[in-house]
Image (cartoon, rainbow, N blue to C red):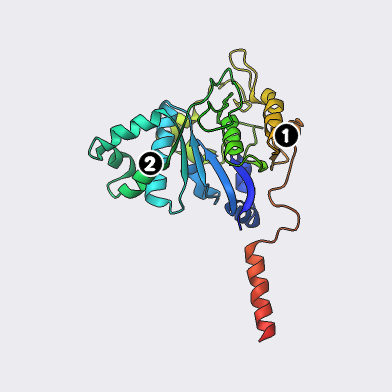
């Protein structure tokens, strides 16, 4: 039975500190939503999402999309639900009408056309509110998804739509600095990943999501609204990193990844083998 909880995967460095038991628990959860760059480097963490969100467009988003698509088509065996900005729907139509030349340039000559078609046909296409204005909380995927100062807000809204009564846990949402868990990799290869080193607020050492930008406050100011919307559906929001900015500032309560009394499958299997030997 899968764990009835939604995990949202950020890209913070704390993801590299997870135990095998914690990774196992997350991988056995009903909803694990990653967004933006996570999928490109997910092997470094070991958590395989059930859902992937990309609502951004532009140069960074193009690189994220292309690398993630290649990953999911050529290397990723577990089915994954894509949630994309509606503009990608027209892009897919263009790809299909180009005799697969564009697809091959992204995914390589040995791409799986069936996997590509599955992603295209089963993707959820969304529209989001303005990232500097926010808006109403969406109650369905047909509504404009709440979006403010970054994809995290929309990821929370989407999880609440997919599983209204499930608690949501933030994993790798550190916000206490601007470094990714794959920071060393992209810094070592700026010719390949240089676009990911560009920041909206290069003058600040803080995470750009929480920094005042063009007179607009950071995402932290919206959490009371977000948590009130969740509570109306019987859901609660937690953060799994006790050192996260959200926890340290008493914005989101801390909760461990695994519940009390959790015993990983590896332990249970070892216990079962031991009992079988005794009973022989």
Can you give x and y, in whole percent of width and height, for residue 23 in the image? 61, 53
Can residue 220 be seen here?
yes
Secondary structure type for disc 1: loop
Contact flag, marks 2 and 1 (Cβ < 8 Å): no
Neighbor class of circle 1 (other Cα within 10 Å; few <14, some 14-19, many 20+) is: many
Instruction: Give the camera-side residue of 119 and 221.
Output: 119
State which quadrant residue 239 falls in. Answer: top right
Q: Is residue 81 above or below residue 226?
A: below
State which quadrant residue 107 falls in. Answer: top left
Can you give x and y, in whole percent of width and height, for residue 183 in the image? 53, 38
Q: Earlier in the sequence, mark 2 or mark 1?
A: 2
Most extreme residue toward the top is: 215
> In the image, which disc is placed on residue 121?
2
Can you give x and y, in whole percent of width and height, for residue 157 in the image? 60, 33
Relative side of 75 to 244, left or right: left
Image quarter hosting the N terminus: bottom right
Relative side of 272 to 250, left or right: left
Most extreme residue toward the bottom is: 280
Image quarter hosting the C terminus: bottom right
State which quadrant residue 57 falls in. Answer: top left
Can you give x and y, in whole percent of width and height, for residue 19 in the image? 65, 54
> In the image, which disc is placed on residue 124?
none
Q: CA distance from mark 2 to mark 1?
A: 36 Å
Q: Which residue position holds label 1?
A: 252
Can residue 10 be seen here?
no
Q: Residue at x 64, y 76 (%)?
A: 273
């Amino acid at each position: 039975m899968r764990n009835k909880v939604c995990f949202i995967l950020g890209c913070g460095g704390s993801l590299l500190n997870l135990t095998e038991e914690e990774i196992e628990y997350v991988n056995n959860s009903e909803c694990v939503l990653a967004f933006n760059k996570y999928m490109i480097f997910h092997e470094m963490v070991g958590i395989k999402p059930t859902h992937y969100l990309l609502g951004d467009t532009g140069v960074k988003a193009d690189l994220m999309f292309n690398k993630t698509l290649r990953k999911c088509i050529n290397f990723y065996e577990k089915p994954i639900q894509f949630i994309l900005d509606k503009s990608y729907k027209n892009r897919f139509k263009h790809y299909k009408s180009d005799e697969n030349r564009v697809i091959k340039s992204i995914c390589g000559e040995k791409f799986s056309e069936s996997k590509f078609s599955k992603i295209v046909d089963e993707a959820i296409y969304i529209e989001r509110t303005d990232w500097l204005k926010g808006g109403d909380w969406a109650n369905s995927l047909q509504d404009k998804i709440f979006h403010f100062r970054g994809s995290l807000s929309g990821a929370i809204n989407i999880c609440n739509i997919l599983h209204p009564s499930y608690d949501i846990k933030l994993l790798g949402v550190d916000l206490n600095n601007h470094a990714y868990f794959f920071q060393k990799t992209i810094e070592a290869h700026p010719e390949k990943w240089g676009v990911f080193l560009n920041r909206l607020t290069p003058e600040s050492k803080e995470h750009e999501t929480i920094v005042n930008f063009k007179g607009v406050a950071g995402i932290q100011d919206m959490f009371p609204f977000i948590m009130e919307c969740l509570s109306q559906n019987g859901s609660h929001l937690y953060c799994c990193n006790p050192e996260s900015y959200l926890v340290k500032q008493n914005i989101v309560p801390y909760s461990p990844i695994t519940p009390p009394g959790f015993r990983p499958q590896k332990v249970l299997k070892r216990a079962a083998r031991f009992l079988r030997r005794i009973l022989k």
